[in-house]
């Protein structure tokens, strides 16, 4: 957490009349679907400034789930895919200490200076590995991005750990090297 954000959270009770936890409880009762609706509510109904309202809404959406929980939930019912996931993580970790893994609800982003890969358990029997390989031609195995859209340029479908082979590792390494 940045120092500025921490300072804002620390000043919240004095500046807004309530702590972050109190604001989270208020928003939880309302169950806003859109970010802007919640910001508007805090500004109009509670007189919160835009900066604080935006911060409160953003932080209220953050999950209490840990990184491990997020990954475990992705593979719930798809446990046979965990060895493939673990092998991919071992491979990207071998590239250097500048690799960050960021689990989300349905995928794990692999980031250097920017995202270069995305690991997603797509079905009970398949992981889709998204890669950012701008300018690289597709092949029978290195497909277009498909459901990843603009998050990735290519996608590889993995059903066995043996598919994490030299060719795939080279594509991952190439994507890593392009992400500076």
Image (tube, rainbow, N blue to C red):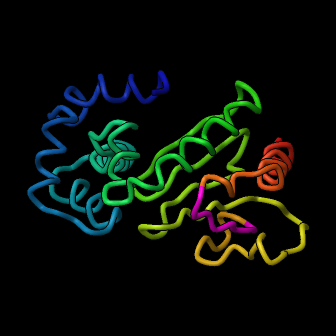
Q: Main secondary structure of the magenta part?
A: strand
Q: Quadrant of the N terminus?
A: top left
Examine the rendered structure and indicate whether residue 110 appears above or below residue 33. Answer: above
Give the image location of residue 15, x and y in percent.
Answer: 25, 31
- Residue 157 appears in the picture as rendered: yes
Residue located 12% across and 45% down the image: 25
Q: Position of residue 165 (x, y in %)?
A: 76, 51
Q: State the residue in front, 78 or 64.
A: 78
Tell me if residue 67 is in the magenta stretch: no
136 with respect to 120 (left or right) = right
The picture quadrant where one finds residue 160 is bottom right
Residue 101: give x, y in percent of width and height: 57, 39
Residue at left offset 69%, top offset 52%: 164
Image vertical order of residue 24 relative to residue 15, above or below:
below
Q: Is residue 123 above or below residue 96?
A: below
From the viewer's side, name the closer residue of 8 and 176.
Answer: 176
The answer to whether residue 52 is left or right of residue 173 is left
Residue 44 as seen in the image, left or right of residue 96: left
Region of the chain picked out in magenta, as a range: 153-160
Task: Examine the rendering and report whether any part of residue 49 can be seen.
Answer: no
- Please, is residue 174 above or below residue 16 in the view? below
Residue at (69% x, 64% y) in the render: 152
In magenta stretch: residue 156 = yes
Q: Residue at x 83, y 41 (%)?
A: 180
Considering every residue shown, the one lying at the far left of the view is: 29
């Amino acid at each position: 957490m940045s120092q500025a954000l921490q300072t804002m959270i620390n000043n919240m009770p004095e500046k807004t009349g309530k702590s972050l936890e109190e604001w989270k409880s208020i928003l939880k009762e309302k169950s806003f679907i859109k970010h802007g609706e919640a910001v508007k509510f805090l500004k109009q109904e509670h007189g919160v400034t835009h900066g604080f309202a935006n911060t409160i809404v953003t932080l209220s959406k953050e999950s209490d789930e840990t990184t491990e929980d997020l990954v475990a939930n992705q593979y719930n019912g798809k446990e046979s895919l965990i060895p493939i996931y673990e092998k991919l993580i071992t491979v990207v970790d071998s590239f250097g200490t500048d690799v960050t893994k960021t689990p989300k609800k349905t995928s794990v982003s692999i980031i250097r200076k920017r995202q270069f890969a995305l690991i997603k358990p797509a079905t009970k029997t398949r992981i889709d590995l998204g890669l950012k390989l701008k300018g690289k031609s597709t092949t029978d195995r290195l497909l277009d991005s498909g459901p990843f859209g603009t998050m990735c340029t290519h996608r590889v479908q993995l059903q066995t750990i043996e598919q994490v082979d030299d060719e795939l590792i080279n594509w991952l390494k190439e994507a890593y090297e392009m992400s500076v």
